[in-house]
Amino acid sequence: MPGNNLMDLFACLAVLFCAAALGHAIPAPACMDPFKSPPAELSGLQEKLKQGKLREFYEEADALLGQCASVDNKQITREELALQLWLFHDIAAAPLYPADYDKATPESIFDDKDLDVKHDMLSFLYVMSRDAAPMARRLHLRGKALCDLLATYAAATYAQFRDHYDPNIEAKHEALKKSFIPLNRKYVEEEFKKKEIGSLVNPQYHVFLNKLGVNNNRNELLKNFISTPRMKYFVEMLVNLFPGQSGAVKNYLRMAGYADKEIPDLINRTLGRTPATEFLYRGMPKNVQKAKP
């Protein structure tokens, strides 16, 4: 169908754009000697991503994450860790579904599986951050390399969420509604000429309103994912991975899209000043070294 072909094209373009923008910023687990090649179990997943089949990609990634849930980080093997790290890499590198405002196609073929899968991956990363150091020692891995991978996948995902969230979406949607008025007027005029008036509303308008609703709902999900309560887990994850390393924590906050001037406020709003986070406040200007209310 033309509509499905168009959406596939949008998805392929999104994959290409993501690869160009993030390909070098998201290192693969191959940077660690034991994980040079992706596990065979992920070959189908990676092929779907290359082909731009995002819906199928996220469905399979969701199923694989479900399988990983039964693995105990304290007992995880190298093979199980390799599968998880490569899976996290692929999910972090994958683009989100493209925004669909096309009035000529039926309701969007996309659900929110992309957002759900990425959010679930962040939960895995948070839990793994608490066990990263002993896990690396037990499996004879370079602890810093493992921590850097986990932090990068989380930071890249939060950056993606922040980049796709539109605080001005209501104004954008109001403008789109006004742009539809001439199309409806033309539809009515053509129907009068054919003397087949059944309704004074272009049937495409209902499709159009549905797509505005879908995009608005997705935007609300993104807003929630980057809210202070959710960002608390990210900042805590970085403190888990890099205790006492203020530079590393702030570097990954920058990777997630936060400017230097935003970082002190983010730390105050999430973890605040405690004995465990005192190291983050060293070197901050006096006027921002305030405790969390």
Image (spheres, rainbow, N blue to C red):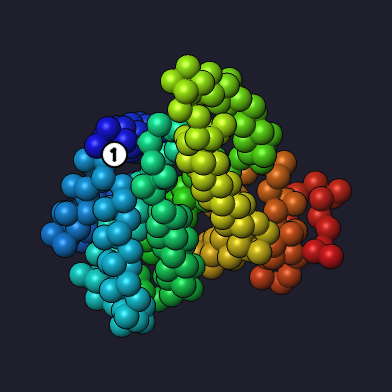
Report crowding for label 1: few under 14, some 14 to 19, many 20 or more residues within 10 A (C-alpha).
few
Residue 40 image position (x, y, % from top left) = 13, 59
Depth check: give the residue in front, 66 or 269: 66
Residue drawn where x is 20% and y is 70% of the image: 79
Could you tell whether 139 is left or right of 92 in the image? Answer: left
For this orientation, the residue located farthest to the left is 40
Q: Secondary structure at mark 1?
A: helix
| Count of residue discs | 1
Residue 80 image position (x, y, % from top left) = 24, 71
Determine which residue is flagged by label 1. Answer: 4
Question: In this view of the protein, can residue 125 be seen by the observer?
Answer: no
Where is residue 173, by image quadrant?
Answer: top right
Question: In this view of the protein, can residue 54 be seen by the observer?
Answer: yes
Residue drawn where x is 74% and y is 64% of the image: 272
Looking at the figure, which quarter contains the N terminus? top left
For this orientation, the residue located farthest to the front is 195
Q: Say if 169 sits above or below 63 in the image.
A: above
Looking at the figure, which quarter contains the C terminus? bottom right
Mark 1 belongs to which amino acid?
A: Asn
